[in-house]
Image (spheres, grey):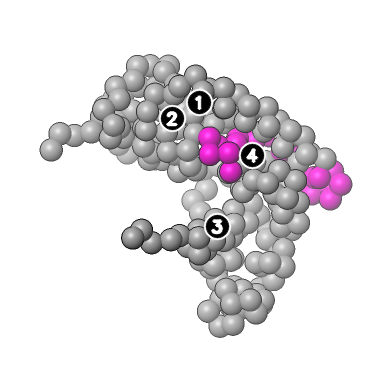
């Protein structure tokens, strides 16, 4: 079997990098706009180079190169960019109203129109759930937070249901996963101490929702 071509692609407002393997026979050139599936989801990217000359020891996320971007993809991305600015302005307003130790930097709305990433700087532990839930309600997006003060930090392993680092002490024992509440104060009670905990919680919540929505093919 022939080895699939792989390209270094930058994506998002922070120019994140991904090694994108092409399984669709696309051979893009430098600077070409492409649609990729990044670790965050479906989004527009820009090809930088083949990964042949990029050391494999470098820690770079993996993705999939799906196709060349169309004019429609680019127009949609421009629309989402403007919507992202609106999201950013709303976030700034809420942060001021709630007195949160956050600085909103930028926002990415992905090509699926359902997911968004809000980039922030966070300098103090704080309760983030009410803030994020209000943004989600206003914009009808599944919004996750990326703390750029710790962009290279590996995610901590915690409770797979609520995202509490070190385990919440209740999941699986009539706790947050069964509606009985979480003794650590995380989950639905809004006691998340940093963006990573909250992001993991909503990611797990989305997986649960998708599992209930899936219908087997006949």
Q: CA distance from mark 2 to mark 3?
A: 23 Å
The residue shown at (32%, 39%) is 57
- Work out whether residue 66 can be spotted: yes
Whether pointer 3 and pointer 1 mark residues with C-beta atoms closer than 8 Å, the reply is no
Residue, disc 3:
206
Residue, disc 1:
73
Give the number of the disc on residue 119.
4
Few, some or many C-alpha atoms within 10 Å of disc 4 (few <14, some 14-19, many ≥20)? many
Residue, disc 2:
35
Spot occupied by residue 41 in the image (x, y as percentages of width and height):
48, 42
Q: Secondary structure at mark 2?
A: strand
Of tags 4 and 1, which is closer to the observer? 1
> Which quarter shows the C terminus?
bottom left
Q: CA distance from mark 2 to mark 1?
A: 8 Å
Which residues are the magenta region? 94-114
Of marks 4 and 1, which one's residue comes earlier in the chain? 1
Q: Secondary structure at mark 3?
A: helix
Q: CA distance from mark 4 to mark 1?
A: 23 Å
Q: CA distance from mark 3 to mark 1?
A: 25 Å
Spot occupied by residue 5 in the image (x, y as percentages of width and height):
25, 29
Q: CA distance from mark 3 to mark 4?
A: 20 Å
Count of marks placed on residues: 4
Whether pointer 4 and pointer 2 mark residues with C-beta atoms closer than 8 Å, the reply is no
Of marks 3 and 1, which one's residue comes earlier in the chain? 1
The residue shown at (38%, 61%) is 216
């Amino acid at each position: 079997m022939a080895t699939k071509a792989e390209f270094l692609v930058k994506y998002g407002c922070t120019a994140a990098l991904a090694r994108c393997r092409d399984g669709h026979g696309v051979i893009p050139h430098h600077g070409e706009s492409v649609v990729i599936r990044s670790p965050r989801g479906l989004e527009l990217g820009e090809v930088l180079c083949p990964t042949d000359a990029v050391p494999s020891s470098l820690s770079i996320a993996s993705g999939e190169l799906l196709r060349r971007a169309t004019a429609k993809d680019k127009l949609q991305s421009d629309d989402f960019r403007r919507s992202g600015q609106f999201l950013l302005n709303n976030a700034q307003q809420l942060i001021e109203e709630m007195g949160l130790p956050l600085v909103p930097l930028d926002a990415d709305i992905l090509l699926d129109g359902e997911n968004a990433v809000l980039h922030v700087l966070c300098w103090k532990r704080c309760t983030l759930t009410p803030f994020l839930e209000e943004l989600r309600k206003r914009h009808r997006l599944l919004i996750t937070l990326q703390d750029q003060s710790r962009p290279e930090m590996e995610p901590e392993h915690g409770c797979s249901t609520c995202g509490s680092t070190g385990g919440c002490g209740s999941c699986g024992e009539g706790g947050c996963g069964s509606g009985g509440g979480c003794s650590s104060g995380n989950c639905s009670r809004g006691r998340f101490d940093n963006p990573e905990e909250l992001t993991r919680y909503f990611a797990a919540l989305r997986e649960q929702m998708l599992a209930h929505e899936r219908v087997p093919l006949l």
